[in-house]
Image: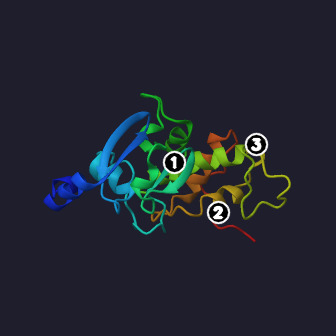
């Protein structure tokens, strides 16, 4: 049974908070109870099930979406707080039948196994690329006065910047290779080591 089909939720919707979400280029007006997360609004209210519910505690990153261009865990974000913001989910990355370069790279580099974490991994990867373009440093950036450029982004930088997204299948090599391909680097071979040497 969908959330909105439950009588008590329907009543709450009547009394709920009105909000407008712009998701993947479309505008949605809805009423939600104050405690409804963005993840539940996407999946249960709007039928956008590409975003996955993993741990539902902000620990696995499966629910990652882009909010005004920045990645957020949609399971930790209240829908009511996103009023008027631009949300991009995995469904909104492709341009018609043309995949986003990161999506294409995930396929070409075998960056998924079961695929459950893949939407969150791809959204996080898209955000990662934009963060680097904006000059954001990471915990492993050696010189904070000179943040890395995309062309010189190291494998350890990619791993650190994606460390908040977990893959239970262990497809990390393919994921790192996919990001490398998307930013124009020659990706490491699939058999490359996953562990970061300190």
When asked about the image quadrant of residue 102, the answer is top right
Going 35% across and 39% down the picture, which residue do you hit?
28
Q: Residues within 10 Å of mark 2 (few under 14, many from 20)?
A: few
Closer to the chain start, of discs 2 and 1, is 1
| Mark 2 → mark 3, Cα distance in angstroms | 21 Å
| Residue 26 on image: x %, y % | 39, 34
Q: Is residue 141 above or below residue 125?
A: below
How are the residues colored?
rainbow
Residue nearer the viewer, 115 or 110: 115
- Disc 2, SS: loop
Res. 93 mark: none
Q: Is residue 45 left or right of residue 95?
A: left
Circles 1, 3 touching at the beta carbon (< 8 Å): no
Which is more N-terminal, label 3 or label 2? Answer: 3
Of residues 18 and 47, the one drawn nearer to the viewer in this rendering: 18
Residue receiving disc 1: 67
In the rendered structure, which disc, 1 or 3, sits on the residue that comes first in sequence? 1
Residue 101 appears in view: yes
Q: Residue furthest bottom?
A: 198
Q: Residue at x 13, y 58 (%)?
A: 7
Dot 3 corresponds to which residue? Answer: 151
What numbered label is drawn on residue 193? Answer: 2
Mark 1 residue crowding within 10 angstroms, few (<14) / some (14–19) / many (20+): some
> What SS does tag 3 mark?
helix
Instruction: Say which of marks 2 and 1 sits in front.
Output: 1
- Depth check: give the residue in front, 81 or 117: 81
Question: What SS does tag 1 mark?
Answer: strand
Residue 147 in the image, given as x and y percentages of width and height: 80, 52
Q: Tell me the mark number nearer the camera, choosing from 2 and 3.
A: 3
**Is residue 24 found left or right of 48 in the rendered image?**
right
């Amino acid at each position: 049974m969908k959330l909105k089909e439950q009588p008590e939720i329907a009543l709450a919707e009547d009394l709920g908070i009105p909000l407008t979400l712009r998701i993947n280029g479309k505008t949605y007006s809805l009423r939600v109870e104050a405690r409804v997360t963005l993840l539940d609004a996407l999946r249960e209210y709007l039928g956008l099930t590409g975003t996955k519910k993993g741990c539902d505690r902000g620990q696995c990153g499966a629910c990652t979406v882009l909010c005004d261009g920045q990645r957020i865990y949609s399971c930790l974000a209240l829908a009511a707080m996103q009023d008027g913001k631009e949300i991009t989910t995995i469904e909104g990355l492709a341009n018609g039948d043309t995949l986003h370069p990161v999506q294409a790279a995930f396929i070409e580099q075998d960056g998924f196994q079961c695929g459950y974490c893949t939407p969150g991994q791809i959204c996080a990867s898209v955000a990662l690329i934009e963060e680097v373009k904006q000059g954001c440093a990471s915990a492993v950036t050696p010189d904070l006065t000179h943040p890395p450029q995309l062309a010189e982004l190291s494998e350890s930088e990619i791993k650190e910047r994606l460390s908040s997204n977990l893959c239970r299948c262990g497809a990390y090599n393919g994921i790192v290779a996919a990001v490398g391909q998307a930013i124009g680097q020659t990706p490491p071979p699939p058999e490359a080591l996953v562990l970061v040497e300190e």
